Amino acid sequence: MFENLSEKLQRVFKNLRGEGKLTAENMESALREIRLALLEADVHFRVARQFIEAVKEKAMGAEVLTALSPSQQVVKIVRDEMVKMLGQHQAKLRTANEPPSVMMIVGLQGSGKTTSTAKLARWLSKNGSSPMMVSVDVYRPAARQQLSVLARDLKLPVYEGTPEQTRPAELARSARKEAMQTGRDVLLVDTAGRLHIDDELMAELSELKQLLNPSEILFVADAMTGQDAVKSADEFHKRLGITGVILTKMDGDARGGAALSIRAVTGQPLKFVGVGEKPDALEPFHPDRVAQRILGMGDVLSLIEKVEETIDQKQAEEMQRKLLEDDFTLGDFRDQIRQLRKLGPLESLLGMMPQIGPIKDLKNLKVDEKEITHLVAIIDSMTPQERANHMIINGARRRRIARGSGTTVQEVNNLLKQYSQARKMMKSFTGGGGFLGKRLGKLKLPMGFGPQ
């Protein structure tokens, strides 16, 4: 996400550093380029204008222009203003004084309300809540069954109602009663949508709001629709009073205009972003972390949280010991590949790394999932002795391994080369004494992936 904008902004900052000294003229030129980059990223024109005016006011001051490293000062100002534009602080979900807290999930048809409802239920369950779901979409064929299937896959409760219950208000009332009786502290209400906003839909949602007195009304928007998502969110807020936004398909949006505009246009925070199709592909929105990613500073905290949530602590500590003792084998390499695949798309993980030093080009690394499958197959075709000591793998062994894995000798050679590179790269992570060295020791990224 944000790849296009990130690339253009980093180019602007690089040009500023090349100036040696900042002047009013080259600052004006840089601000014009930043404004153009925002507009090309589909940021709302009014939001882009306000952003540039705020940056200009601070960046054109004598204190910045005469600073020892003025370009770094400008980067800091842009970052601070971007955080402000995105919402300053992470907006947490609001809960009712007495359970269950009702959260209405609203939005246009096709925006991803039902899958977002299930993902949010999973996230709440993982974070100490006991949610229940209900679909009150009585119009779309099989809408209620779709939520039931998702709930069963996640092993979370859903109120299905009876075939006779055909009114949204009736379903919602019964679901809340069921949630209270079964000790559920959150009720997620998946509402109906339309292809466009109409009075009938708004009347139904207003009735549900009056009946349920929800602690949250979360608008689900498709990031791929750009400014249409922002306009719809604004209209829903004016007519219904939303309390936050869930932006879906962020992983497929290289521009990011909706994410950058929604808070400024609606006045309501972006609370979650959908970053994939899997049930765990829903993340809380952190304005400061997103701003850092856009400016090439990485999102190390999110990366660490994802790793700590997914990777077994004891295995990680054992792997760190092996790396420090230079005992990292091909078998360990295979195990790390398998663990990393649990974290999601590797390109997404690499995008969270700071774009500095030896890892500055990792964001451009294209990871072929088929290639990763081939890597595992090649290692599986080795004997235990070969996995333990790669130095014994001579030409004859390479030909046998290639035949056994359905690959070529060249692919086996590439794997061994990637394994050697990975050992060096991962040792640099675990051997450092700084923040990255200490905290990312668990990560063990096999950096050798991708075309050589």
Image: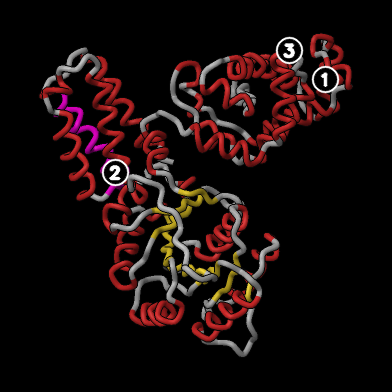
* Residue type at numbered disc 2: Lys
- Find out whether residue 35 is within the magenta segment: yes
Cα gap from disc 3 to disc 2, whole angstroms: 46 Å
In the image, is 379 to the left or to the right of 81? Answer: right
Dot 2: what SS? helix
Question: Disc 2 marks which residue?
Answer: 84
User: How far from the left and from the top, in percent, is residue 224?
Assistant: 41, 52
Query: Which range is magenta?
Result: 26-43
Question: Disc 1 marks which residue?
Answer: 387
Quadrant housing residue 40: top left
User: How far from the left and from the top, in percent, is residue 60?
Assistant: 13, 28
* Residue type at numbered disc 1: Arg
Question: Disc 3 marks which residue?
Answer: 325
Mark 3 crowdedness (10 Å alpha carbons): few <14, some 14-19, many ≥20: few
* Residue type at numbered disc 3: Glu
The correct choice, above or below, for 258 with respect to 184 in the image is: above
On residue 246, which mark appears? none
Cα gap from disc 2 to disc 1, whole angstroms: 51 Å
Residue at image position (55%, 70%) is: 187
Dot 1: what SS? helix
